[in-house]
Amino acid sequence: MAKRRKTDNTTSVAAAEIEALIEGRHQDPHRVLGPHDAGDGAVVRAYRPDATHVEVALRAGPTVAAERIHDAGFFEARLGERPAPGTYTLRVGYGDVSFELVDPYAFWPSLGEIDLHLVGEGRHEELWRRMGAHVMTREGISGTTFAVWAPNASGVRVVGEFNSWDGRLHPMRMLGTSGVWELFVPDVGSGARYKLELVTAEGRLVTRADPYAFWAEVPPGNASRVFDTDYVWNDQEWYVAQEQRDPLTTPMSVYEVHLGSWRRGEGGSFLNYRDLAHALADHVEALGFTHIELLPVAEHPFGGSWGYQVSGYFAPTARFGTPDDFRYFVDHMHQRGIGVIVDWVPAHFPRDEFALARFDGTALYEHMDPRKGEHPDWGTLVFNYGRNEVRNFLVANALYWLEELHVDGLRVDAVASLLYLDYSREEGEWVPNEYGGRENIEAVTFLQELNRVVYGRNPHALMIAEESTAWPGVTKPVHLGGLGFGFKWNMGWMHDTLSYFAREPVYRRFHHNELTFSLVYAWSEQYVLPLSHDEVVHGKRSLLDKMPGDRWQKFANLRALYAWMWAHPGKQLLFMGSEFGQWREWSEERELDWYVRDEHDHAGLERLLRDLNQLYRQHPALSSRDHDPGGFRWIDPNNADDNVLSFIRCGHEGDPPVVCVVNLSPLPRERLRIGLPAAGLWREVLNTDAEVYGGGNVGNLGAIESDDLPWHDLPVSAEIVAPPLGAVWLIPEH
């Protein structure tokens, strides 16, 4: 124990408390430091290590020299009466140099009992308003309040540019037994860099970024930054329009984007969110997509993770600018009529020592048992979904992106890895649930709580599950026993479709069921059809390069695939670069190969995507009954020998049906008879073999006339030309 310096003056502070403060393990430094009543007067105490002298300067009174009562830098000034917060400053001297500062230990806590009660129960839905760093004015003094949850730490200190990264100067207090530590630091404003120092139960000092920080340093830096937004939103019209829109029955075609590699600036530098907003909105608007979906943009240390290993859940990555730059990005998209979905990663987080891993020296956010707390595939840690505060952290984070950053939806990553205790684990590497099963009951409860809270507060949000198994009821409401998502990625459709299209046409007749099988279960969930980033990396090749045959056949196959996809029940998602047929696999290290758009077949493919989206928006039959079996009818699902599929998309009464015929043989089918639901003239509104798309112009000269001949259990029929490796869409002329 350090020696106490003997002085003529004595202090009422116990030696053990001073020692705890010096060692960084005092859980209530405000009980010792700052102003206190003392007998007939008062004292102001300060702990300023390395200082040679300290004075207390009263705003309306004298300046009083403080006595050093401990060699480690513990000072005490005796006053006539206790000064109010903000009515005095400390003048701290280091030899000939001195600094004047407002005493942070004069202020009451900024979190009340109700806040702490909700935090403890895991029910504080607006957690971001209390935790983290918040610029505020208290007792006429501007500064920043810091708050963090670290229940197992012996002490917590805030360090930053404002105290020369010396944590001894700003120990925080734990509020009751909540595990929440808090401190108001005067004169700290937006932009300040900071971290948290924690003394573990074993006495080890660790440094962490703030889990609730709204902003962070540009990687590889990892300090948190104070941020005080002054952004004024201009997307009110967008929200009014969304209130009138049912995402289940209206068009939704999604352009998936990795911001860091969509376009680059000079020398390969990243563009700012604001520059990206204008360029991306121009491109998406021209193509007619209704939404964009961003690969994770929460802060992450390693760019090669594509954002899927998050270190700052509340901070849009600083690679592209400030949090308000991101707000501008979303706002601009909304003003251009484009929705914004972001990838959200509640399934795991990285082991980086500066972030969430063993945050307070214990397994705080992750599960303590490695059989439940470590992910064997990704080398990451898994959240402890059975802990109230952890669930609260994630649910509040989802609400933050939706309500504070105005994103329209969250695509929830890797849901299957949450649902199964044995996910990617061998026998003996996982722990059964209380009933002996493999289902992760705690994670199921978390997902249900997530969707219940999100939809309860944001009924027009889009909650989309990336779930690759046959787990029942992913999009069934929570009150009916489901997980409560709005949509689920149809991974089965994706795998079967790409498997079929990758085959040489001569073999496709033996795999016809790979296309028809998706219609067996198409209405079991509310599906999105994804051709995502995962399908064009790691040796899988680009979508164009997956297609068999020569160059012409590759483009024809891909055009037919897109027409099949846009006509199939479900919403659509396409990864960037696929709209113009990039040859190379996607890499996060370079921008897309935009130069290929100058070539006729690439430009034609992009024009096809534009026309598909336009027709998709124009004809309600293609979207209004996506999740209703009455919205689809096969004409002929069994023509495997000719590699032909034909079907009808049906809308509500008064909506014209759309007849779709897809010929996946390189031979034209010139006298193909198909049944039709109504007599008359049928216009060919789409032909993927049109010359303008890069095709050979094989088709029906714009229209066909029905014959009074029943066919395929339909009242009339017609002979049509189905172009090679092509698709046609027909609508009745009224």
Image (cartoon, helix red, strand yellow):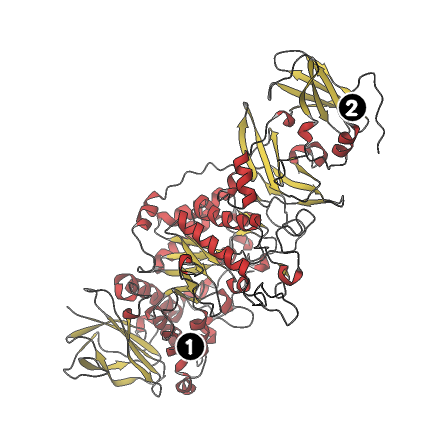
Q: Which mark is residue 52?
A: 2
Query: Is residue 176 toward the left or the right of residue 729 in the image?
Result: right
Q: Which residue, given by chain and number where applicable, does mark 1 sit on?
A: 554
Q: Is residue 227 visible?
A: no
**Sooner in the amino-acid sequence: mark 1 or mark 2:** 2
Measured as percent of width and height from the top left, residue 442 is found at 55, 58
Measured as percent of width and height from the top left, residue 290 is found at 35, 57
Q: Nearer the viewer, mark 1 or mark 2?
A: 2
**Label 2's element?**
loop
- The quadrant of the rendering that contains the N terminus is top right
At 51% from the left and 67% from the top, the residue drawn is 534
**Quick check: marks 1 and 2 in contact, CB under 8 Å?**
no
For the residues marked 1 and 2, what is the alpha-carbon distance in whole angstroms? 78 Å
Asked if residue 709 is positioned above or below residue 241 in the image, the reply reads: below
Say which quarter of the image contains residue 649: bottom left
Query: Is residue 598 toward the left or the right of residue 83 in the image?
Result: left
Q: Amino acid at mark 2?
A: Thr
Measured as percent of width and height from the top left, residue 5 is found at 84, 24
Asked if residue 505 is positioned above or below residue 18 in the image, the reply reads: below
**Label 1's element?**
helix
Q: Which mark is residue 657?
A: none
At 19% from the left and 74% from the top, the residue drawn is 682
Badge 1, how many Cα within 10 Å: few under 14, some, many 20+? many
Asked if residue 317 is positioned above or below residue 68 in the image, the reply reads: below
Depth order, front residue of 393/514? 393
